[in-house]
Image (cartoon, helix red, strand yellow):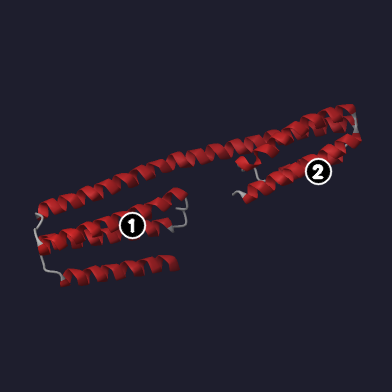
Amino acid sequence: MKIKMSISLIALILFAAFLILFLIIPASLNSIVAYIFANLGIILLWTSTVFLVGEDNNYPIYVQFPVEMRNYFILEIIFSFFVLLIQSLVWELPWVAFLLIHFVILFIFIVRIIILYAGKKNYIDKINTDTNKNIQDKNQLLYEIDEIKGLAIKNNVGTSFINSVYETLKYSDPIKNDSSDNQEKQIQSYLKILKVSVEKENEKEIKQLCMEIKGLIEKRNKKIKENK
């Protein structure tokens, strides 16, 4: 709420500043057009910034909205300034041409915003796809451990060690990243060896392997946390 109030206050200051400039500079059709588009730029910048700080608009792609509107605002202000400066010194650009150029600049930035907003869906779809795959990969590992645990119960060997590995992975973050790929592959390799050890009923080896796997899971979790 405080952020929105601050943004609104800045917008009001800009409105007041451009109103004063409009009243100071010699009146002309071009100055009226410049004043209208300056106010439009402030409104668009204010709207996009308030939209960004909204509770439900926290996608990284939304950061570009106020950036684009800021760039538009700066560009149209610079353009208006030079046109009005040249007008006061040398030559007056026809107001229709001045208005048309402003509309072209606005159109370009609106198209850019539309493209960014359309890209939001692809971004969300990618996040959902990656999340679902991560959850499936974790569930697959849990299934493999559970299968080994069932074999351990049958052979009456190393059940507590395997159960400890299962619980460690169960409460781990499923959303992995590239930094944890090496640990993921090592865990899968160790699980294959662990299954063989359970089949051979080698409790000492089972204990050692379970300690190694738990260490890898903890290392995986640490890397994921560090690279979020």
Neighbours of disc 1 within 10 Å: few (<14), some (14-19), many (20+): some
- State left or right for residue 28 relative to residue 219: left
Residue 180 rendering spot, x and y as whole percentages: 65, 41
* Residue 188's disc number: none
Q: Which residue is mark 1?
A: 70
**Disc 1 from disc 2: Cα separation:** 54 Å
Q: Which residue sits at x=20%, y=61%? A: 81
Image label count: 2
Residue 58 rendering spot, x and y as whole percentages: 47, 53
| In the rendered image, the vertical position of residue 22 relative to residue 69, given as above or below | below
* Residue 164's disc number: 2
**What kind of residue is marked 1?**
Arg
Task: Give the quarter of the image for residue 178.
Answer: top right
Report the front residue among 20 and 12: 20
Residue 12 rendering spot, x and y as whole percentages: 30, 69
Task: Give the quarter of the image for residue 87.
Answer: bottom left
User: Can you say which quadrant of the picture contains the N terminus?
Assistant: bottom left
Q: Which residue sits at x=63%, y=51%? A: 226
Query: SS class of the residue under badge 2?
Result: helix
Of pointers 1 and 2, the one earlier in the residue sequence: 1
